[in-house]
Amino acid sequence: MKKLLLSLFLVLCAILHVPSSAYAQTITGKFPTLAGKLIKLSVFEGFKVKGIDSVLVSAMGEFQLKYDQKISGVGVLSSTVGKPLFIILANEKVELAGEFEYPESIQYLKGSQNQSFARYATEHPKRMQAISAWDYLDALYTADPLFSKSNQARLAVKTEKARIYNEDSLFLAALDPASYVSWFLPTRKLVSSVSYTAQYDPAAIPATLAAFRAMNYSDPRLQSSGLLKDAVESHYWLIENMGQPLDTVFAEMNRSTELLINSLMGHDKELNEITDYLFDLLERHSLFQPSEYLALKVLNTNGCTLNNDLAKQLETYRAMKKGNKAPEIIFTGKVQKSGNSLALIKSISQIQSPQKLIVFGASWCPSCSDELPKIAEKYRNWKAKGMDVVFISLDTDEQAFNTFVKSFPFTSYCDFKKWESKAVQDYYVFGTPTMFIVDQEQTILLRPNSIEQVDAWVDFYMNGEK
């Protein structure tokens, strides 16, 4: 019986140890300056980074990290010194040597895809620097009368630029089309080229925009590349800076949003993450028309499942968009102004003013602690121009509410129910501070995202430039 148990134990051990060689690939290296320090390997998962292995570097500076051979993407080597080092994880053994703090010293001794990656990462920036220099000469020999007479020189400049571009393209074309790096390098090039294209090569904007629109944002290669954030931002930055009228910019953004969302259908996790990020990006840039289009596009698309927080966030634009009528707010709790109780005011509609800024916030909200005192400072000027302010607090503690609002010169209200407050739910508030500007009929005029935008809107609106 003991022999049988021993045999079973040995078989089990063998089974448990097989995967270490079967499923794991290795990254080995020698970084002498990291001796005794921890080195970590992480991978990208959409917008996030996930650690998968770590080890102490030996006294000789040697280390070995493992990753699952099923992983295909970009890995990040990091330590307490030096900048993170990016490597290609594509079921190949990788061997490195050099000084971790100085990336230019690192040699890729093994791993063909990483060798291609390292070579292109070195050569491509040099080519682009040369192109910039030739662009300067191209403009000089084209526009400056002192040089424009030299047709031969101008032709030589154009010929050299074409040669450099062709050399770059030939390198990418020679990569194994089945390799991860053959997808990664052109995508990285596209993302990194946006600023140059907008500034120096506007003729290439249509083709660059078309490449972004053709991108499949649910592609696992993109999700594991570390390029997802930059791809989304660069895509919309290019449209915003393409030198077109605002209406055209909005139309182009809406077109890109439609194609992006279509590429995410059937991939709920990626749809939620990218929509959430893009929505926040558009809001931060005060691109409210495109953010509204995004919200309505996602909410009205069948076949996708949104998480509750995102659904509530997007629903704000469907229920609380410009032109809709904002719900009445009945004051069932405490109403206060400059430290005095306002028991006679029973609803927000009783506050008579051509416009009202409704602000949802709380004493426990760090941003509100910064923003509400600034609103109080601007209140007299806004009030003189016809806009009152009403603060709807999400506080649960009466003393905290009283202390927070006692110096505010505008009306403050709290029913101490936090997110369960009827006003909060009626207005689809999912974060603080949230603001709305409404007129006397409670029609929503604007959903501002900053005090600066409110201030500019008051000046613009009161000047009659609607």
Image (tube, rainbow, N blue to C red):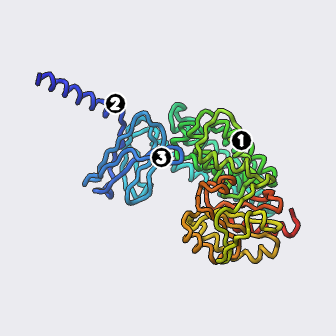
- Image quadrant where residue 10 sits: top left
Pick whichever, 218 or 270, lies toward us: 270
Mark 2 = which residue?
Answer: 22
Q: Quadrant of the C terminus?
A: bottom right
Mark positioned earlier in the residue sequence (2 or 3): 2
How many residues crowd around disc 3 within 10 Å: few (fewer than 14), some, or many (20 or more)? some
Residue 323 lies, in percent from the top left, at 81, 53
Q: Which circle, 3 or 1, is nearer the viewer?
A: 1
Mark 3 = which residue?
Answer: 118
Residues at discs 3 and 1 in contact (Cβ within 8 Å): no
Pick whichever, 417 or 29, lies toward us: 417
Pick whichever, 217 or 1, lies toward us: 1
Q: CA distance from mark 2 to mark 3?
A: 27 Å
Residues at discs 1 and 2 in contact (Cβ within 8 Å): no
Tell me what residue is drawn at x 46 percent, y 39 percent: 113
| Kind of residue at disc 1 | Lys
Return the residue found at the far front.
344
Mark positioned earlier in the residue sequence (1 or 2): 2
**Left or right of 44 in this view: 348:** right
Q: Is residue 219 above or below residue 33?
A: above
Mark 1 = which residue?
Answer: 297
